[in-house]
Image: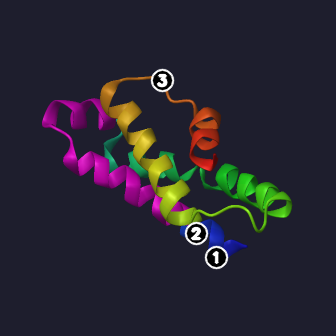
Amino acid sequence: SQDELMLCAAYLALGARTRLLLADRESYNRAVNGIGELEFVSRVIEFAPMIEQAWLAMHQVERDSFDKVWAYEVCEPFGEAYAVAMLTGSTFDPAATLDSLMN
């Protein structure tokens, strides 16, 4: 639903921004260089539809066996993982990150 998508986007942004605020100045500048913090957050929330689709597909199959709170335990850590990759200059693999958080 639109509400769940927006909630996912909010927790993606929360996770990413939390990591940005904890970073040292050099890492922060590396992550937002040339784009600024608003664009940085915009880029992470672009993953919300992909994550929402994974949730819908998984929820149809494992409705009763998935024991995580989606926003807290998938969306927010995904945002954190994205930020860590950008802060460290690492490659970010969204599919692998999502898979590890869902299992």
Is 12 left, or right, of 86 in this rendering?
right
What x and y, as percent, mark residue 70? 58, 63
Identify the residue at horizontal 30%, vertical 54% (top origin): 18
For the C terminus, the image quarter is top right
For residue 71, above or below residue 49: below
Measured in 3D between alpha carbons, the distance from the residue under mark 1 to the one under mark 3, in whole angstroms, is 30 Å
Identify the residue at horizontal 73%, vertical 73% (top origin): 1
For residue 57, above or below residue 84: below
Task: Say whether marks 1 and 2 touch (CB < 8 Å).
Answer: yes
Q: Nearer the viewer, residue 55 or 90?
A: 55
State whether residue 38 appears in this view: no
For residue 12, above or below residue 35: below
Q: Earlier in the sequence, mark 1 or mark 3?
A: 1
Q: Nearer the viewer, residue 55 or 38?
A: 55
Determine which quarter of the picture holds residue 59: bottom right
Residue named by callout 2:
6
Residue named by callout 1:
3
Inspect the image, locate mark 2, and give the three-letter code of the amino acid beneath it: Met
Is 6 left, or right, of 77 in this rendering?
right
Element at label 2: helix
Identify the residue at horizontal 68%, vertical 73% (top origin): 2
Q: Which residues are magenta?
A: 8-33
Measured in 3D between alpha carbons, the distance from the residue under mark 1 to the one under mark 2, in whole angstroms, is 5 Å
Inspect the image, locate mark 1, and give the three-letter code of the amino acid beneath it: Asp
Q: Earlier in the sequence, mark 2 or mark 3?
A: 2
